[in-house]
Every structure is written in C-alpha cells, then in structure tokens.
Image (cartoon, rainbow, N blue to C red):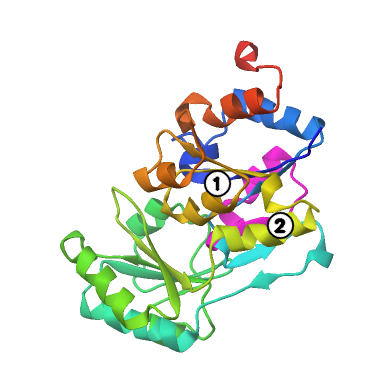
Amino acid sequence: MRKHLIVLDLDGTLLKDDKTISTRTYKTLQNVKKEGHMIAIATGRPYRASKMYYQQLGLDTPIVNFNGAYIHHPGDRSFGIHHSPLDLETAKTIIDTCQAFQVNNIMAEVIDDVFLHDYDETFIDMLALSTEPAAHGNLKNVLHTNPTSLLVYPKRESAEALRELISGKHAQGIEQRSWGAPHHLIEIIKTGNNKAAGLQKVAEYCNVSMDDVIAFGDEDNDLEMLREAGIGVAMSNGSKEAQQAADVITAANEKDGIAIFLEEKLKLHSQAMDQ
C-alpha cells in the first residue's frame, strides 16, 4: 500500500476548541502509524507550545513551527536546525511603525524565548505562552538578536491600516499573517517562510514526495501547504480561503474531521464506536 505523510495543523484542525485531541482522532492516528504511514505537525506555534501534542501522538518526524520559520527534529540531531528569522533591523523598523500606531502590545520570539513590549498578564494568558518572558520593555532595546517572529496586537480600529502600511513598507522582507477574531493579531515572519516550504524538508527526511502528503489545515497560514500537498484537506470550520485552497473539505475540528477523512481514505476501521 502507498505510504503517506499525514501533516497536521494544530489549532482549529487537530485540536478541539478546548485544545485537546479527541479520543476518536487520537485512536485513528495511532492506527495510521500502525499501517506504516507517517505523521508530522506543521503549526504557527513555537515548539514549547506544540511539544505536548508531539509527545502525546508519539511522533518521530521533524516538526514545523512558526509557520516554517523554525524546523527541527526533537529526536534526531542529524536533521539539523533550520531557522530563518527576521533581520533585526527590519524587525526594529516594524516595531517603530507599530509604536506609531499605539498598538496594544508587541511580542518577539526567538525560538522558545519570548520578549514582550509591555508586561501584561491578560496578554500572556490570551496567548497561553506557557513560559515567562525572557525580558520586557521597549523591544528596540531588549531585543538583541534576529527574532523568529513578531506578533502585534493592534487596536481594532487601526488594524487594517497598520497591516497595509507594514505590507507597503516592508513587503520585500516579510510574510504577514492575520489572526482571526477575537484578537485580530498580526504575525510577521521572514519572507519565504511558510508551512509548505518547511514541509518540503520534512517530506525529504521521510523519503516521500509532496504527492504523498495529506495535509490538514483551517486558516490562512495553511494555504501554501494545502495547495502543494498531494491532498489538501480543509476543515469545515476553516476560513473560506483555506477551503478554496484545499482539494477536499472534511468535518469540523469539533466533529472528528481528521479521523473521518483518514478512516475513509486509508480504509481504516472506524473508531466511532470506541468512544
């Protein structure tokens, strides 16, 4: 039987709204591995906030974090570390622009270290940082190395204008993504980074082609991955753009969409009766 690499986005896709993996989906993914298929994670999250799911699923593949800006293999150092951060001076220019718009907050991440412009418990809880900031204060002063990503929390009324200004001034050096409601955050990483680019490295390590990849996603940061995978599967709870980019639409993250698709596609025994 043809062996596939199953690639999973986390939030809104693998994870239910309470940030857990359903029993049926978990059991189906274990059956997928028993059948000889491989499973990988591709997420916008940093590794520290995705490690628990990697371990829960018992994975042995490289993981794509920060939407492709950081790819590594937790169990195989020979894979190397593929880190493509923003240029520090570009980041500082963006920070200047954001400060002019009096944004609510700015966060910079350097792999698993977090730097906050304003120390704000509500903001920390909102992002479920799972770590204490390495430093806080004016990011132009506390940030001394190229950041993996910037996360901007704009005022709602000026968010669109800020996105347009950033795109106009810095478009050559960055990729910009918008988070949906309720927070409307702006995420900025180095240009050329996306999940599909990271996934190419994972597929090569797993000795499969992109035609062998089945990728699941739900949001704008999944578009390239959904388009370039052999089979791109969007969740029914996903954005309109994600559904248009995909080959197939499956049930929502709350309705075991991943399990339903894989059970049918890979002819696995349904886990629905086992819950």
**Residue 217 point in image, percent of width and height:** 51, 44
The residue range painted magenta reads 47-67
Q: Which quadrant of the figure has residue 26? A: top right
**Residue 83 point in image, percent of width and height:** 63, 72
Say whether residue 50 is magenta.
Answer: yes
Location of the N terminus (image quadrant): top right
Q: Which quadrant of the figure has residue 24? A: top right
The reply to whether the C-beta atoms of the residues labelled 1 and 2 are less than 8 Å apart is no
Residue at 63 percent across and 62 percent down: it is 198
- Classify residue 12 as left or right of residue 274: left
Q: Mark 1 points at which residue?
A: 9
Q: For the residue marked with disc 2, what is the amino acid?
A: Val
Say whether residue 142 is magenta.
Answer: no
Q: For the residue marked with disc 1, what is the amino acid?
A: Asp
Q: 75 and 3: which one is in front?
A: 3
Q: Which of marks 1 and 2 is in front?
A: 2
Vertical relation: 59 (above or below) 262: below
Q: Name the mark on residue 202.
A: 2
Q: Is residue 192 visible?
A: yes
- Classify residue 180 as left or right of residue 42: left
**Residue 152 point in image, percent of width and height:** 34, 67
Residue at 78 percent across and 48 percent down: it is 60
- Badge 1 crowding class, 10 Å Cα cut-off, few under 14, some 14 to 19, many 20 or more, is many
Q: 235 and 12: which one is in front?
A: 235
Mark 1 vs mark 2, CA separation in Å? 14 Å
